[in-house]
Amino acid sequence: MLTFVLRRLLGALPVLLAVSLFVFGFVRLLPGDPARLVAGADATEQEVASAREVLGLDRPIWEQYLRYAGATVRGDFGISSRTREPVFEVIAVRFWPTFWLTLAAMGWATLIGTAIGVWAGAKRGRWQDQAVMLAAIGGLSFPGFWLGLLLINLFSVHLGWLPTGGFDGWSSLIMPSFTLGLGVAAILARFTRSAFVDVSGEDFVRTARSKGLRERRVIWRHAVRNALIPVVTLTGLEFGTLLGGAIVVETVFAWPGLGRLLVDSIAFRDYPVIQALILLLSAEFVLINLVVDVLYGVLNPAIRLRS
Amino acid sequence: MPRSLPSSSRIRTAFRSVAVAALLGLASPVLAAGQITVGVGDNILGLDPTDLNDSVSLSASRLFFQGLYGFDRNLKLVPVLAERSEVNANSTEYTVHLRRDVKFHDGTPFDAAAVKLNYDRLRDPSNRLKRQSLLEALDRVEVVDAFTVRLILKAPSGVLLNYLAHTGASILSPKAIAQYGADISRHPVGTGPFVFASWTPDTLKASRNQQYWRQGLPRLDGVTIRSVPEGGARLALLRSGEAQFVFPLPPETVQIVERDERLAIDKTPSIVAQYVALNTTRKPFDDPRVRQALNYAIDKAAFIKVVYNGFGTPMDAPVAPGIAFYNKQGVWPYDPAKAKQLLAEAGYPNGFETEIWNFSNTLNNRASQFLQQQLAAVGVKVAVNPLEAGVATTRLWGAKTPEEAQVRMFFGSWAPSTGDADWALRPLLSSRSYPPALYNLAYFKDDAVDAALQKGLATADPAERKAAYDEVQKIVWEKAPWIFLSINTLVLGRDKRLVGLSQLPDTSVTYEEAELK
């Protein structure tokens, strides 16, 4: 398995290289002049020219590309044009808030999502099933900013239990992660339910029942474990998406994460930060896909890992 | 949910919150004495005032930095690190006498050498600082003695002190400049009332400067600035007691704050003009009658009410009343019949079709739609095209000549941060200020205006300057290169216990005299 993991990681390198080249060209296709954005609307021509020099945009495009490629290979992602900080630091300080938010949100999502998914699946066709699935559709269609503001008003303004936002201690994680997790929980619940229903009709479940096992054990040991494979795939994908930053939730809860950073950087045409963020996102997806593949093997030993 | 719960449930709530707080290890939002938290709408991007151009960062940098001059809350020029100054007869040499009792936060004494080093640093184009043009009038800076500097100009100027008063011309510690180099924007060391404590992505912390040169100030022990981009969340920050002051407050949330007995609203007339630039080089806006017609077609009072919930006053001159040399012309009356008549005289009895741009955001889009509706009533069909910030840079400044300009109507605003008529008029109305040089989006050209603007800039004599700017304002008002709309009121929400806070008309905030009662 170690060989498998190593090979997959090596195989990811060309992917990341291709992404880095692609994104270099892509950000420059966006309309807009970064130098003017940096200098401001009331800047003189001299100030705009200075900004262009500072950003290195006065150089020919091929030279800009060679510098970028050379620096990126050495792990140097350049300087943010918005804040003049090294891009690595800009991203590093916002990565961890996003990481913890994602982890907590996925915690809520898997807890709520799989539990009600399995429960609905076990009660399929009955009123509990329909009620829960209706709630799941509701959860899916709850706009995050609305739910977020509602929670803030209740728990911060009226009850004073939780801070309105920002990342300052674990209590500040509760509302944003719940808001973010609820939407994912709804997707997971629907997915788990159908996977569970599929598996429930399989021979090994019938066998387990006919062995006289208790229903609870049949569900959790036999059915759920096998139903989990597609759920794990979906969880991985959702995890990757959330790691890219959750723009709405981060905005409502003033969360210092990657989503707002990406949006602000695009609005500011902060080329170095956009490039590095997209590279980071690609790397995260490569890693998550790898973890998902490894988990398949853990859940079902019949799946062999071969490169 | 109602504010006042029945008493039993209030007690239960209190118990529960204590239990939950204990469980989560929460500190309840009780204030440390003299510490305040401020919620602002944008991120702070840096703390070197000479290299900043966004109002949130500039305002934050004022915690730490001061210049030789500054503005009081009425935007009157006042000496800060300077004691006084003299100017020679032809306005080419300013001699500035400095305060002798000032030290930077790092203990370095403030003196003439520090001023020279800072000014030479700012105006040297090879340092590529964003505020370099503030000092472009300077030819050289001379140290006369330890506490006197002489500023020698390339050409006569009457507005030099206003430029020195801009936050961008603040004085940094020479030692810190040498020590931190390019990293100076993360290490603010100035002479201001607060010293830097920490700065994480969304939170800036400053604490009291124990050695501050003004006796008994500042009164606060510390200030924390948090960026909270969402308006509703910013309101919640104030209502939950986590912040004692938030800005800006979305106009539609003002009533909620007013209803809360613990909170107060402060209103400050701004110097920010909201207007529509009409491209005077293009048909039909090349005809002054058409431009006048559009001014008649808009109900300014309704505009302010609908777009800004009433927080503003109609423009009655090309500059705001807070600007030096403002000269009241009277509001363009709302008269749609007159508008139609003028359009007919100009050859557009059935109106025409055109397009309006803005920098896309909620308020700008609302404003553009309001204008669209009112202009439709006089037969002018306007397509509203909000521009994303990056796209706007290409559309507005991409044109190298007036002929290439695509702009027809542009709704926007201008905040002349020197408080003087020159920077309120010249960048917007001089024929030398066509984009990409500056911001004359109306491509307005009038020889008398050009001459008067040059005259006003080149003299320090208040009477001559007044005459020049009177003339400019009169001509501009008649020729109407803009639809003159409103001067907005700045709305700030605060905890009633926080007093002495002052917001200047250019939106910057001073914490020096603030205190928590």
Image (cartoon, rainbow, N blue to C red):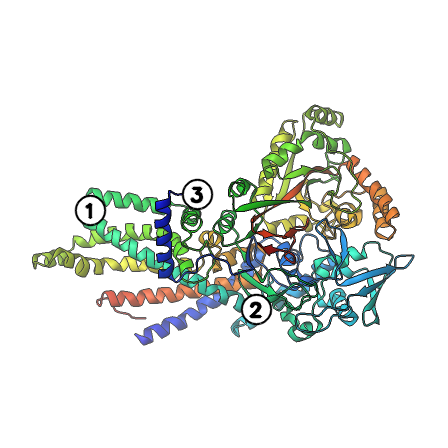
Callout 1 touching callout 2 (CB < 8 Å): no
- Whole-percent x and y of residue B407? 68, 43
Q: Quadrant of residue B511?
A: bottom right
Q: Which mark is residue A86?
A: 2
The residue that disc 3 covers is: B3
Q: Are marks 1 and 2 on the same chain?
A: yes
Which circle, 3 or 2, is nearer the viewer?
3
Callout 3 touching callout 2 (CB < 8 Å): no
Q: Chain of mark 2?
A: A
Q: Secondary structure at mark 2?
A: loop
Q: Disc 1 residue type?
A: Arg
Q: Is residue B252 left or right of residue B506?
A: left
- Nearest the eye: A145 or A279: A145
The residue that disc 1 covers is: A124
- Whole-percent x and y of residue A77? 54, 69
**Residue B28 showing in the rendered view:** yes
Q: Which mark is residue B215?
A: none
Q: Are marks 3 and 2 on the same chain?
A: no
* Residue occupying image coordinates x 48% and y 60%: A258
Q: Disc 3 residue type?
A: Arg
Q: Quadrant of residue B217?
A: bottom right
